[in-house]
């Protein structure tokens, strides 16, 4: 009788422990999911805020564009890092990530146009790069490799500013930019308004930057 009682207690303890582990797993999963959702909302809100901030900054400096050349490069890089992290947590094709990339891309393009204008008006020595990439299986490998090259160049040269544009994103301005520069091959780089179609090694791009 005592043996049966012990076995019953073990059985109950095992069930209780299993339930606790299951409930704990649900709680952890829910906590992680909520954290990811908060990350998404944070990046989206910050992208829209920085876009508005850049528009105001442009308006204030319209008459004296060379007096204060400070733009939002650091904020862009920070947002880009957060967006890349979220892509690893979900997937590059997740609709939430694609929707999140739209305000960020608009911020990038607005920043690109502002920096391009400032460079021309103020004789600043920037090398400005538009990087058209794709996450399509046919193009993703070369696109990622080109992205690594650009990361290297940005770290090596303080005057290199690169903007990564998803060529497949459903935004009218991206189609306008592709038409303007005649971009039909992915990946492609536009460096100071000149198009470099396909993948390019860092040595070739170093020569372009140093010989401009």
Image (cartoon, rainbow, N blue to C red):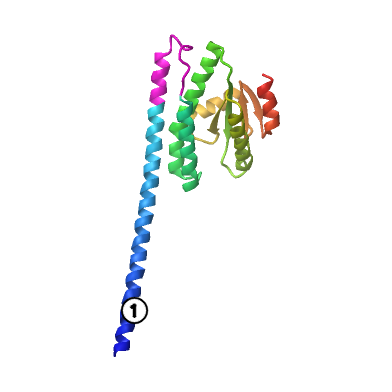
Side of 32 where 147 appears, left or right: right
Answer whether residue 66 is magenta in the image: yes
Side of 2 where 58 appears, left or right: right
Answer whether residue 208 is magenta in the image: no
Q: Residues within 10 Å of mark 1 (few under 14, many from 20)?
A: few
In the foreground, 103 or 176:
103
Side of 91 where 7 appears, left or right: left
The answer, for residue 90, to whether it is visible in the render is no
Locate the C terminus by quadrant: top right
Q: Position of residue 57 (x, y in %)?
A: 41, 18
Would you identify the image quadrant in which residue 99 lies? Answer: top left
**Residue furthest toward the bottom?**
1
Q: Secondary structure at mark 1?
A: helix
Q: Which residue is mark 1?
A: 10
Q: With respect to residue 94, does 131 lie above or below?
A: above
Residue lying at 36% horizontally and 59% vertically, measured from the top left: 26
**Residue furthest toward the top?**
63
The answer, for residue 203, to whether it is visible in the render is yes
In the foreground, 185 or 192:
192
Q: Position of residue 5 (x, y in %)?
A: 29, 85
Q: Position of residue 74 (x, y in %)?
A: 47, 28
Locate the N terminus by quadrant: bottom left
Residue lying at 49% horizontally and 43% vertically, measured from the top left: 87
Residue lying at 33% horizontally and 62% vertically, measured from the top left: 23
Residue lying at 58% horizontally and 29% vertically, measured from the top left: 154
Side of 44 where 191 appears, left or right: right
Give the number of callouts. 1
Q: Position of residue 168 (x, y in %)?
A: 54, 36
- In this picture, which residue range is highlighted in magenta? 51-71
């Amino acid at each position: 009788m005592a043996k049966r009682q012990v076995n019953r207690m073990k059985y109950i303890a095992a069930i209780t422990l299993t339930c606790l582990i299951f409930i704990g797993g649900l709680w952890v999963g829910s906590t992680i999911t909520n954290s990811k959702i908060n990350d998404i909302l944070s990046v989206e809100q910050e992208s829209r805020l920085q876009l508005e901030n850049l528009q105001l900054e442009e308006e204030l400096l319209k008459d004296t564009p060379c007096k204060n050349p400070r733009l939002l490069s650091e904020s862009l890089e920070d947002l880009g890092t957060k967006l890349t992290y979220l892509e690893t947590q979900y997937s590059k094709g997740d609709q939430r990530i694609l929707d999140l990339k739209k305000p960020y891309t608009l911020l990038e393009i607005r920043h690109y146009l502002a920096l391009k204008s400032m460079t021309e008006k103020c004789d600043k020595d920037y090398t400005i790069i538009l990087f058209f990439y794709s996450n399509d299986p046919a193009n993703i490998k070369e696109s990622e490799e080109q992205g690594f090259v650009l990361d290297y160049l940005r770290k090596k040269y303080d005057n290199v500013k690169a903007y990564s544009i998803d060529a497949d994103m459903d935004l009218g301005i991206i189609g306008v930019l592709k038409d303007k520069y005649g971009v039909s091959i992915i990946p492609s780089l536009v460096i100071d308004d000149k198009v470099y179609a396909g993948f390019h090694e860092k040595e070739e791009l170093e020569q372009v930057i140093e010989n401009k």
